[in-house]
Image (cartoon, rainbow, N blue to C red):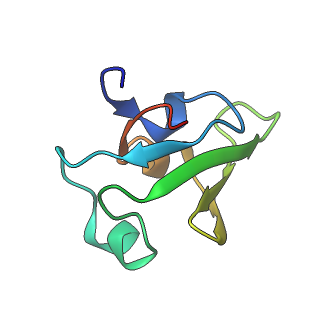
Amino acid sequence: MTSPSTLNQVPLLQWHRVATQGAVHPRLQELGFLPLENVRVLQRSWLPGGALVVQVGDAVFGLRPDEAAQIPVQGPVQ
């Protein structure tokens, strides 16, 4: 595995895991962004600073870039 980054930095459609180190905001944890959960970015807005469409497990959410920046990830996952 490569060094951890954050969800807003990962390439489209590439599975990663939420990192075990680093704190994820409790509200994001309630949505399912828990350590070792598989996650990927499905789409990015064409607007600068626009939303990201992300998949965590089987759920799909829209996140602001600042929210995605709070989710540390490891990967990519094979």
* Position of the N terminus by quadrant: top left
How far across and how far down the image is residue 7, in percent?
48, 40
Q: Is residue 12 above or below residue 37?
A: above
Q: Is residue 50 above or below residue 61?
A: above
Determine the residue located farthest toward the right in the rendered image.
Answer: 46
Residue at x 48%, y 47% (from the top left corner): 68
Viewer-nearest residue: 64 or 75: 75
Left or right of 64 in this view: 37: left
Q: Quadrant of residue 37?
A: bottom left
Determine the residue located farthest toward the top in the rendered image.
Answer: 2
Viewer-nearest residue: 25 or 33: 33
Residue at x 19%, y 52% (from the top left corner): 23
Residue at x 42%, y 47% (from the top left corner): 17
How far across and how far down the image is residue 20, in percent?
21, 49
Q: What is the tally of numbered marks visible in this picture?
A: 0
How far across and how far down the image is residue 19, in percent?
29, 45
Q: Is residue 69 above or below residue 36?
A: above
Q: Quadrant of residue 11?
A: top right
Left or right of 42 in this view: 36: left
* Position of the C terminus by quadrant: top right
How far across and how far down the image is residue 35, in percent?
29, 58
Viewer-nearest residue: 60 or 2: 2
Left or right of 4 in this view: 50: right
Q: Quadrant of residue 54?
A: bottom right
Determine the residue located farthest toward the front in the rendered image.
Answer: 78
Residue at x 55%, y 30% (from the top left corner): 10
